[in-house]
């Protein structure tokens, strides 16, 4: 029984590597192609465990299902408000700008910033093209 669980976890991790910031339902649909016996509950439980232990990042957006990102290094995201796509910014924000923002927040709040997460919202290129 333990071996099956490990195989399912491995399939979930593999799906996260292939899919782009997927929802749990998208991971489930992908894994189900290879393991039809897997349940949506199993996928949800494993994704929750992975996010708790730091294996993946859980991206929570208002009025959207959570998305999951296997890239756990410090980075930020751009979110399309039309299609819901989540895009890594690939650390395109200069480090000095981030440091300045941290210092500004610390001075204004007294909080010692230990990490930051930015979400930039707008309309992605694909949706802009569709809308024009």
Image (cartoon, grey):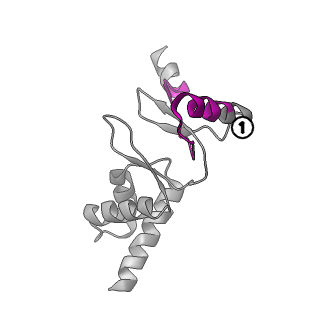
Which type of secondary structure does the marked residue at label 1 adopt? helix
Q: Nearer the viewer, residue 14 or 90?
A: 90
Q: Is residue 132 left or right of residue 34?
A: right
Q: Nearer the viewer, residue 85 or 69?
A: 69
- The x, y position of residue 45, in whole percent, is 32, 64
Answer whether residue 101 is magenta in the image: yes
Answer whether residue 108 is magenta in the image: yes
Compared to residue 114, the image places residue 56 above or below, namely below
- Residue at screen point 53% across, 39% down: 111
- Residue at screen point 57% across, 42% down: 113
- Residue at screen point 42% across, 77% down: 7
Specify the quadrant that holds the N terminus.
bottom left
Compared to residue 35, the image places residue 20 above or below, namely above
Q: Is residue 23 left or right of residue 123?
A: left
Q: Which residue is mark 1?
A: 95
Q: Is residue 104 left or right of residue 126?
A: right
Residue closest to the far front:
110
Residue 108, quarter of picture: top right
- The x, y position of residue 58, in whole percent, is 43, 51
Compared to residue 89, the image places residue 121 above or below, namely above
Residue 91, quarter of picture: top right
Magenta residues span 100-126
Question: How many numbered marks does the figure carry?
Answer: 1
- The x, y position of residue 97, in whole percent, is 69, 30
């Amino acid at each position: 029984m333990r071996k099956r669980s490990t195989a399912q976890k491995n399939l979930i991790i593999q799906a996260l590597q292939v899919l782009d910031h997927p929802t749990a339902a998208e991971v489930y649909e992908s894994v189900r192609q290879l393991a039809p016996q897997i349940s949506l509950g199993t996928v949800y439980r494993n994704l929750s465990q992975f996010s708790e232990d730091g294996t993946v990042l859980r991206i929570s957006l208002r009025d959207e299902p959570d998305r999951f990102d296997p890239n756990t290094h410090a980075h930020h995201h751009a979110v399309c408000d039309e299609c819901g796509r989540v895009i890594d910014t690939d650390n395109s924000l200069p480090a000095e700008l981030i440091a300045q923002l941290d210092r500004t927040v610390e001075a204004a709040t007294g909080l010692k910033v230990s990490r930051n997460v930015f979400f930039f919202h707008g309309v992605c290129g694909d949706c802009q093209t569709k809308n024009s």
